[in-house]
Image (cartoon, rainbow, N blue to C red):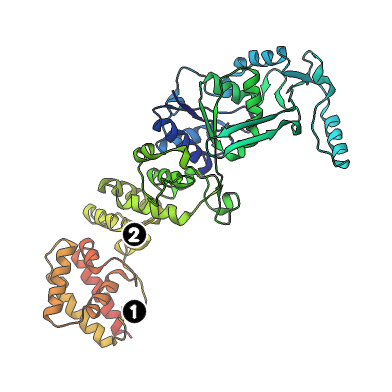
Amino acid sequence: MIRTRIAPSPTGLLHIGTARTALFNYLYAKSQGGQFILRIEDTDQARSTQEFEQNIVTGLEWLGLHPDEGITTSGSKGDFGPYRQSERTELYRPYLEQLIVSGAAYWDTTPLEEIAQQKEQAQQAKRPFVYRPECREQQNEYRDGAVLRFKVQDEVIWFEDKIKGKIEFDMSLMGDFTLSKGWDNPLYNFVVVIDDELMKITHIIRGEDHISNTPKQIVINRALEFSRKTFAHLPLILAPDRSKMSKRHGAVSIDQYRQEGYLPEALVNYFALLGWNEGNDREEYSLEELIQKFTLKRVQKSGAVFNIDKLQSVNASYIKALPLEQKITSGVQFLSQNRYNIQHLAQDQLERAIDLECQRIKTFGDIGEGIDFLFKDPVYDSNILLWKDMSISDVKENLEWVRQVVYNIEEKTSKEIEQTVKAEIQQDNRKPGCVLWPLRVALSGKERSPSPFEILTILDKPTALNRIDTALKLLSER
Ligand code: GLU
């Protein structure tokens, strides 16, 4: 059974890198009929917090990446717990002992200052610094302040990365690294190996920033005679200038995307494309479709550039495709959040306004700006009432004429209204632009807005007539 895991450290909010790694682990596990596990790596107690853990766990679930095992919003589940490293301390000790007994690890009490001195001397002499102290050959007992080090051998360690291909390390360049500070403070490279084994993880899929940890984990894994794991390192997410993506390039926390009105399905869809494609330029996939199509083979080797315009356009299509009730729920929520006064609109007017706006917006955070004229009378410069080279009197005459047409309208849908108004225009032998432009501006106060027919399905008739009167008044004052 294929088992993958996401193993975030709760030292910050859930960010796009972790979300994308979680997604690829989820997709790989699900595509193989396997399981996806969420483990919290909180060995760095000084920087880990419960709030960050909660943010990560709820964020992943919000994205729809529900773990089969591990920490969930409704507690821990699975047979291989605890799934929080801080609760596993006593599980680690026997493995530390085993490494000491087999001679793969040793206690080192060399003071840090002395190691720093050795390093400096090496630098001055321009030789590489490879820490291999004499005490590595002695069977020292534990003493206060001692660290347990892994005895690195001179050899070449290699592994076949499922994404990057063969990767080799010359271990003669690597110093003896720390497994644990004392008995009770085991460190990342050691605990990760124990946890992956005890949790029966088969595939370790993670960011390429972990490649340098992999040889360390391989030698520990081998020394403990654990099963071999398969590794796949994902390309970094890059900013448009190809530097490492960070806060200064835009939002990196999932929370922020949620608050700005991105849909989880759109984020998941976009994250899948950050480093993976099916071999064509298809851009829209549901999570189910991704599970069917995903393979590690088609993950690219080099950095994946984050393109906010593409994410926004994916999000816009997901908003357009939402069922009406969801448009309304999110629309109302974000309109209130954006402080639009929607109280005086009747429910059906509000629903039509939101539906209309959902054709245009890229995120729910954008909602309102394009239809604010529906909530309050617009204030605008009368110049924009003039279509091309129309004279003021021409505009007035057309507006007065169309006022009567609007007054008589009985139709309800935008299509019907359009037909009626256009038929009247034709019958009266008028130029459509000369009527429709001033009408639309009178109703919306904007140079760009939805069509007058759509606006007329939302504004009630007295308001529409009132706005035409206001426009006529503005023109008379000129
Ligand atoms: N805890 C590590 C991190 O948050 C992940 C370790 C791993 O995937 O092996 O970067």
Residue at the image position 47 percent from the left and 39 percent from the top: 297
Residue at the image position 83 percent from the left and 26 percent from the top: 111
Question: What is the x, y in percent for residue 237?
Answer: 54, 47
Residue 194: which quarter of the image? top right
Local SS, label 2: loop
Task: Between residue 239 and residue 226, name the one nearer to us.
Answer: 226
- Amino acid tagged 2: Arg
Question: What is the x, y in percent for residue 452?
Answer: 24, 69
Q: Is residue 193 left or right of residue 339?
A: right
| Picture quarter with ligand 1 | top right
Question: The C terminus appears in which quarter of the rendering?
Answer: bottom left
Q: Is residue 224 left or right of residue 403?
A: right
Question: The N terminus appears in which quarter of the rendering?
Answer: top left
In the rendered image, which residue does mark 1 sit on?
Answer: 382
Residue at the image position 23 percent from the left and 61 percent from the top: 458
Q: Is residue 425 visible?
A: yes
Task: Between residue 432 and residue 129, name the one nearer to us.
Answer: 129
Question: What is the x, y in percent for residue 217?
Answer: 63, 27
In the rendered image, which residue does mark 2 sit on?
Answer: 360
Circle 2 crowding by C-alpha within 10 Å: few under 14, some 14–19, many from 20: some
Q: Is residue 334 left or right of residue 198?
A: left
Marks 2/1: CA distance? 26 Å
